[in-house]
Image (tube, rainbow, N blue to C red):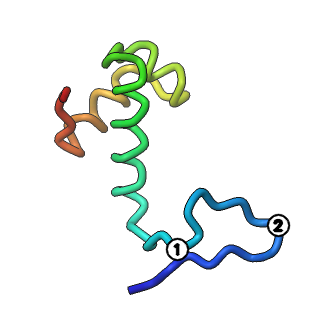
């Protein structure tokens, strides 16, 4: 497995975290934003700087469900 090791000046939340594929990171971030706004998709799309249809496609792509 690969581990992130911050260089001097890098700001990492968790310097020992395992690297994950970009799709996994995007899905995790979208889920986090959706949960933060109570699944208000219009607000989430604005925060993420994507259109509402793009957000809907990503929700479908990553099989995200409201918890």
Q: Quadrant of the N terminus?
A: bottom left
User: For residue 66, which quarter of the picture?
Assistant: top left
Asked if 46 appears above or below 20 in the picture, the reply is above
Q: Is residue 51 left or right of residue 28?
A: right
Q: Is residue 65 left or right of residue 44?
A: left
Q: Is residue 17 left or right of residue 58?
A: right
Judged by depth in the image, the label closer to the viewer, 1 or 2, is 1
The x and y percentages for residue 9 are 82, 67
Q: Residues within 10 Å of mark 1 (few under 14, many from 20)?
A: few
**Identity of the residue furthest to the bottom in this view:** 1
The x and y percentages for residue 61 are 22, 43
* Residue that label 1 marks: 16
- Residue at 43% from the left image edge and 42% from the top image edge: 29
The dot on residue 9 is: 2
SS state under label 2: loop
Of the numbered discs 1 and 2, the one sitting upstream in the chain is: 2
- Residue at 45% from the left image edge and 14% from the top image edge: 43
């Amino acid at each position: 497995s690969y581990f992130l090791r911050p260089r001097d000046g890098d700001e990492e939340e968790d310097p020992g975290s395992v690297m994950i594929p970009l799709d996994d990171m995007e899905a995790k971030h979208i889920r986090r934003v959706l949960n933060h706004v109570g699944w208000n998709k219009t607000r989430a799309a604005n925060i993420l700087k994507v259109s509402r249809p793009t957000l809907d496609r990503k929700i479908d792509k990553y099989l995200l469900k409201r918890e």
